[in-house]
Image (cartoon, grey):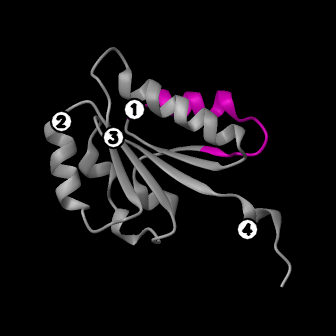
């Protein structure tokens, strides 16, 4: 069987854990186990609650980001930029409209960065 370019592109989902996480995580349990999901929080309590809900999902990882002005957003943009540079398809899950502008600015040709409202929108 011949492998196409589309099959070689890795997809990663980056979630803004500080912005309506319950809405954003909708569909997370439908993501295949080989699909990488990373969630960023600046609130330890929210991270802890999320970790309890997703403890059996080995493909889901969460990270604490020291609070600060746009700390989580900047961390997600940094990760998205690195992944994009590696040719990966990136989905940023957030209710924050700034990510839509970032995705459009960052990717004019291949649509490799997508800003969506929930994980289910990545399926």
Query: What residue is at 32 percent from the left and 54 percent from the top?
Result: 25
Residue 53 coordinates in the image, percent (x, y): 20, 60
Residue 78 coordinates in the image, percent (x, y): 54, 29
- Residue that mark 3 sits on: 63
Disc 2 is placed on an element classified as helix
Residue range in magenta is 96-113
Q: In which quarter of the image is the N terminus?
A: bottom right
Disc 4 is placed on an element classified as helix
Disc 3 is placed on an element classified as strand
User: Dot 4, crowdedness within 10 Å: few (<14), some or many (≥20)?
Assistant: few
- Residue that mark 1 sits on: 96
- Residue that mark 2 sits on: 44
For the residues labelled 2 and 1, the Cα–Cα distance comes to 20 Å
Query: Tag 1 or tag 2, which sits nearer the N-term?
Result: 2
- Residue that mark 4 sits on: 7
Determine which quarter of the picture holds residue 58: bottom left
For the residues labelled 2 and 3, the Cα–Cα distance comes to 9 Å
Query: What residue is at 30 percent from the left and 16 percent from the top?
Result: 68
Front: mark 3 or 1: 3
Left or right, 63 with reference to 37: left
């Amino acid at each position: 069987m011949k492998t196409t370019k589309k099959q070689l592109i890795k997809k990663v989902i980056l979630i803004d854990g500080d912005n309506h996480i319950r809405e954003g995580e909708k569909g997370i349990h439908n993501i295949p186990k080989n699909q990488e999901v990373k969630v960023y929080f600046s609130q330890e309590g929210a991270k802890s609650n999320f970790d309890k809900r997703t403890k059996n999902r080995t493909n889901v990882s969460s990270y604490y980001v020291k609070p600060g002005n746009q700390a989580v957003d900047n961390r997600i943009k940094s990760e998205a930029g690195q992944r994009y540079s590696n040719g990966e398809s990136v989905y940023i899950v957030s209710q924050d409209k700034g990510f839509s502008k970032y995705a459009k600015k960052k990717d004019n040709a291949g649509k490799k960065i997508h800003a969506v409202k929930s994980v289910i929108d990545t399926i």
